[in-house]
Amino acid sequence: NAGVMQNPRHLVRRRGQEARLRCSPMKGHSHVYWYRQLPEEGLKFMVYLQKENIIDESGMPKERFSAEFPKEGPSILRIQQVVRGDSAAYFCASSPTGTSGTGELFFGEGSRLTVL
Amino acid sequence: AQSVTQPDIHITVSEGASLELRCNYSYGATPYLFWYVQSPGQGLQLLLKYFSGDTLVQGIKGFEAEFKRSQSSFNLRKPSVHWSDAAEYFCAVTGNYQLIWGAGTKLIIKP
């Protein structure tokens, strides 16, 4: 049973370009979470999605960032017009249920974005 | 405000020595508490979690943690560290899906 798969593992973009990060949850998991980890900092919650629904995007920057989790295919975190401050590791996690936070989150290995 | 504090950014211990990583939290209700480990270049792996019941929780890789409500702490311990334990350790708290994370403690193992 494959774990949470994220790709690309490393992505380099120039300022102003777009970055697309993909996350395939574990089989049977319908809840996906995105976190951002800046250097020397802990993870910061960005967005929580279920299939075709954004449940909570309170951690997402208001501009340039968007996320989706379509009925078919992986969840995608999209960053438009990237800036140097977007350089970070972006982690995706999934869980079979999303209620109460009582379930374990299974994490992918992260996508490391570097903006030149 | 809800928060998690890991006061030690780095900790260095000798291989075979005991380890304690500190975690203090501020949370309005009964918290669910987690410790995750992140090896270099890897994702996060759950070490252990506390929801209720026995306040001493056993996890994987020989780790344990003790929940002390009076001190708002959930410190991680291991009696004898191995070189493979070198990693970054994160404490997290939640009452819902939105985990609140500490900034992490980087564990360095001296041979």
Image (cartoon, helix red, strand yellow):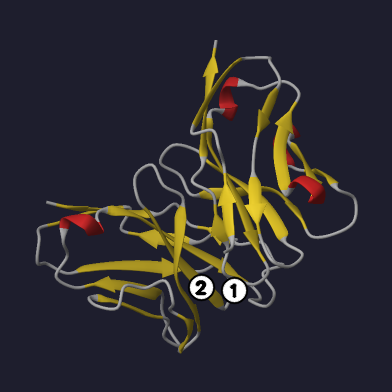
Q: Position of residue A49 (x, y in %)?
A: 49, 80
On-image quarter of the C terminus of chain B: top right
Q: Which mark is residue A29?
A: 1
Between B56 and A66, the one nearer to me in the picture: B56
Helix, strand or loop under label 1: loop
Between B79 and A106, the one nearer to me in the picture: B79
Mark 2 in CB contact with mark 1 (< 8 angstroms): yes
Q: CA distance from mark 2 to mark 1?
A: 8 Å
Q: Amino acid at mark 2?
A: Val
Occupied quadrant, residue B73: top right
Q: Position of residue B14 (x, y in %)?
A: 60, 13
- Label 2, on which residue? A32
Q: Position of residue A28 (x, y in %)?
A: 61, 74
Q: Amino acid at mark 1?
A: His
Q: Position of residue A18 (x, y in %)?
A: 17, 69
Q: Which mark is residue B7?
A: none
x 55%, y 68%: residue: A94
Compared with B48, A32 (above or below) is below
